[in-house]
Amino acid sequence: MPAATTSDVLIVGGGLAGLTLALQLRQRLPGISIRVLERRAGPAPISAFKVGESTVEIGAHYFADTLGLREHLDAAQLRKFGFRFFFSEGCARLDEACELGISRVLPTPSWQLERGSFENLLAERALQHGIALETGCCVRAIEPGHDGAAHAVRVQCDGDTRAHRARWLVDASGRAGLLRRQLGLGEDNGHRIGAAWFRVDARLGLDDWCDNPAWRGLCQPAERWRSTNHLCGPGYWVWLIPLASGAHSVGIVADAEAHPVESFDDFERALAWLQRHQPALAERLGRHRDALLDFRFLRDVSYGCRRVFSADRWALTGEAGVFLDPFYSPGSDFIAIANGYITELVARDFAGGLQARDVRHFQQLFFSFYRNMLNLYRGQYAMFGDARVMSAKVLWDYAYYWGVLCPLVIGGRLTDLGLFADLQPELAAAESLNVRMQAFFRDWHARAGAGAAPAWMDQQELGWFARLNARLHDSLDDAQVRARLREHVDLLHALAAALAEDAAREAPELAVESLCAIAGNRARPVLFRAAA
């Protein structure tokens, strides 16, 4: 065995999670040594690479502002036209489906990422900032240290065996989850979905799929194709994500029982499946068979983990730890959250102040974010084809995300334990209300069925909704951020009551009294029924 190379922080995995963590650590701790080991040799392919192309506000803020990559995002990636949902099961024309989205781009930016070009940029930045990046490395053994001992990792690289030792070890190996598997930390989270995805070297310009100027004119500019478009039906959804190269990413995500992944696990089966469920998309894809760039599928998409941070100075980030669901694109958000906590723990350690209780508190907060988001998905896929209930659920889920999670993360309060202590009653009430609301949506769907919805639901016309987005980057002091979060929790209570009242008009047998009582005399936010 050769002599071991020693680093302060050793990151196993040089993808999105590992490289962004390395850059964040370098910003915070310019004097420490950081080494990244990546299995892939050479640059990443541009288009046919990894999923996770769509960013939302927390992840977008992390890349643009925390890491300072806004110039690259604006110049080399695509500005996203928000999320857009078509309840289009069996529809040959999208202008005949119920559509939920925005008519104008909201003020807080997010981007569609070409993962290959983006990760290549991150690798270049890492090298420029003195981060050691070794590629073509296959990990052969990991020996986690205990009670202050260094961690050891042995890799095979270009036919040679190399040994590495480090004070901190971070697993960013993605779905391989090297440390998660070795330590037996994996956990079934009860959310069973399968997925298949592929890229075509063609722009799927859905604005031009229908010869309907009035429909195209509902959005200004008429560029629906720049959205993360969701084509929804009972038990499944299909994503359409444009990439800066001109390619388009397409994915099918479905409840494992309703739509087994075996029914769409290669391109021809996927195309036949889409012909049954989303014929408008299938017809366009049929024109681009020769432009297929790749195809992959997964049976078990979602999973949990019992621990992600340790006082023995190891941590998991990205898909090496947990993965929820592609819906709402939370992957980069949880990279931002995990990397924020890891950076703080490493900084405290090198300042001589790492405490086991800090590790425990940060892990509890991380899993609180994870648990809150898991509730948005688990048991909910049956209603995905119900335009009426899903339009209400999407409003609620956005309000919860923008109103509670985003101010904590974008506002830089992830590690502010005093704030979490002060707002514990309000945050606990919001979490409890979210659990009840997700159960309420299931009950509403089961009792009312696929109720009628407006053909076009413009979130931009809901003043309170647009205002939540516009204020995400407000600079707030300690007192103001507490007041803002309390204001948002009040809004959630009032929104819960407004949605319950709306549902009761369609399904009077729904038990909505408790949800309505929560709001008290708070003014009810305007909903689509009144705004349409």
Image: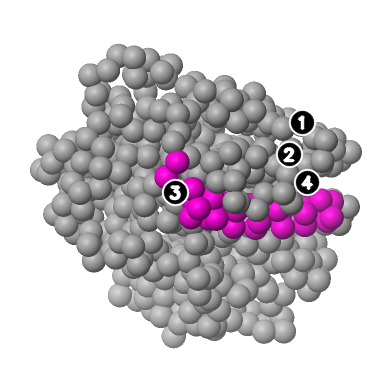
Q: Is residue 467 above or below residue 425?
A: above
| Kind of element beneath mark 2 | helix
- As rendered, which of 389 and 417 lies closer to the eye? 389
Q: Is residue 19 above or below residue 472?
A: below
C-alpha separation, residue under disc 2 versus residue under disc 3? 24 Å
| Residue 449 lies in the magenta stretch | yes
| Kind of element beneath mark 1 | loop
- As rendered, which of 483 and 336 lies closer to the eye? 483
Residue 523's disc number: 1
Among the two numbered marks 1 and 2 on one chain, the one whose residue lies closer to the N terminus: 2
Give the x, y percent position of residue 282. 19, 42
**Residue matched to label 4:** 517
Q: Is residue 198 above or below residue 139?
A: above
C-alpha separation, residue under disc 1 versus residue under disc 2? 7 Å
Residue 110 seen in the current view: yes
Q: How busy is the neighbourhood of tag 3: few (under 14 within 10 Å), some, or many (20 plus)?
A: some
Q: Are marks 1 and 2 in contact (CB under 8 Å)?
A: yes
C-alpha separation, residue under disc 3 versus residue under disc 4? 25 Å
Give the x, y percent position of residue 506. 54, 41
Q: Which residue is drawn at the image coordinates 22% and 62% (left, top)? A: 263
Residue 449's disc number: 3
**Residue matched to label 2:** 494
Q: Which residue is drawn at the image coordinates 73% and 44% (left, top)? A: 516
Check disc 3 and give the amino acid type.
Answer: Gly
Q: Main secondary structure of the magenta part?
A: helix
Q: Quadrant of the N terminus?
A: bottom left
- Span of residues in magenta: 423-451
C-alpha separation, residue under disc 1 versus residue under disc 3? 28 Å
C-alpha separation, residue under disc 1 versus residue under disc 4? 12 Å
Q: Which residue is drawn at the image coordinates 16% and 38% (left, top)? A: 283
